[in-house]
Amino acid sequence: MSDEVVHGDQESSGPESAGPKTAERALVLGGGGVTGVAWEVGVLAGLADNGVDLTEADLVIGTSAGSVVGVDVRSGLPLAEFYQVQCSPVRPGEATAKMGRGVMIKYATAVAFTRDPIKAGRRMGSLALKARTETEESRRKVFESRIPIFDWPARLQISAVDAATGTFTVFDASSGVSLIDAVGASCAVPGIWPPVTIDGKRYIDGGMRSATNADLAAGYRRVVIIAPLTQGFGPITSVATQIQQLTAQGSEVILIKPDKAALLAIGKNVLDPANRPGAARAGCAQGAAEARAVATLWLADRQDKRAEAAD
């Protein structure tokens, strides 16, 4: 069952919702907690070190952890700087959380007996609104300290879910909302972190609709998906399903997901910052290993031009 997509507080009619004039290359960054941020940054750094710069994407789509990395990608700052931050030791007082058995049972209950993503989103939202968490204000300060820019960059989309209605929402530069609040909303894991208030509405993690929301890249010829988490369950669509949809519509897609070494480094608790440095280094190694395959897709136009010039 399909769900409604809203851009900010408006129906999908903003200038960015139609995509750029040339819908060529899209980068999709999925959710995966603190260690997911580190691993994704590592992958991007490893690719860049080997001649594949994904910051050149025509569109960047960020969900949950991927929204944090998406801002990094669009900031204009060197990926190497973000990589070094992720490899640094845990800061004193840095928050550690855990998605315990109780939270997971609540998630399973929320999506049980429905294939309707909007209904599931409402249930997840209700769970989040009832949970005892830290305050929105204190959580916002965390993102203020992490986000390298405060003004919206172009061609960045950040996903969230309306906690009251279950509606899937996409924020971008045309939405008229704070970039920090958009990232905070996309990262508001139900039962762990507080829903984020934007224009009187409260929003939760965009990963409650899909780990990547890769279907937002529809219409782009070449798509690279970097996803710490790929599985779906119930009404939450798997990455594999969204890749099938994209390829059926004519897109060429490459998926990078954690290999065995990365999974070991990430560990069982994706919200534990102690695993961040190892996850970043594992991601960098994996990015280097994946560089040739990604370059074949991402740099295809340049390779074609070189071949033509050689002829």
Image: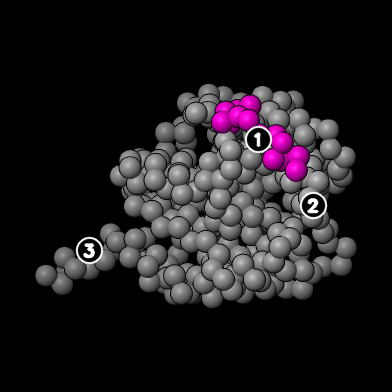
Q: Residue at x 64, y 48 (%)?
A: 64
Q: Determine which residue is flagged by label 3.
A: 305
Residue 281 placement (x, y as % from top left): 61, 74
Please state the extent of the stretch shown in magenta in the rendering: 105-119
Q: Residue at x 76, y 30 (%)?
A: 126
Q: Disc 3 residue type? A: Lys
The numbered dot on residue 100 is 2
Q: In the visual, does 286 lie left or right of 278? A: left
From the image, give the main secondary structure of the stretch colored magenta: helix
Mark 1 and mark 2 lie on one chain; the one further toward the N terminus is 2
**Badge 2 amino acid:** Gly
Rendered residue at 53%/41% (across/down): 237
- Whether residue 297 sits left or right of residue 230 in the image: it is left
The location of residue 9, given as percent across then percent down, is 61, 26
Is residue 151 shown to the viewer in this render?
A: no
Q: Position of residue 66 (x, y in %)?
A: 60, 52
Near-viewer residue (166 or 260)? 260
Examine the rendering and report whether any part of residue 54 can be seen: yes
Badge 2 element:
loop
In the picture of the structure, the residue carrying the numbered disc 1 is: 111
Q: Residues within 10 Å of mark 2 (few under 14, many from 20)?
A: few
Residue at 41% over, 58% down: 254
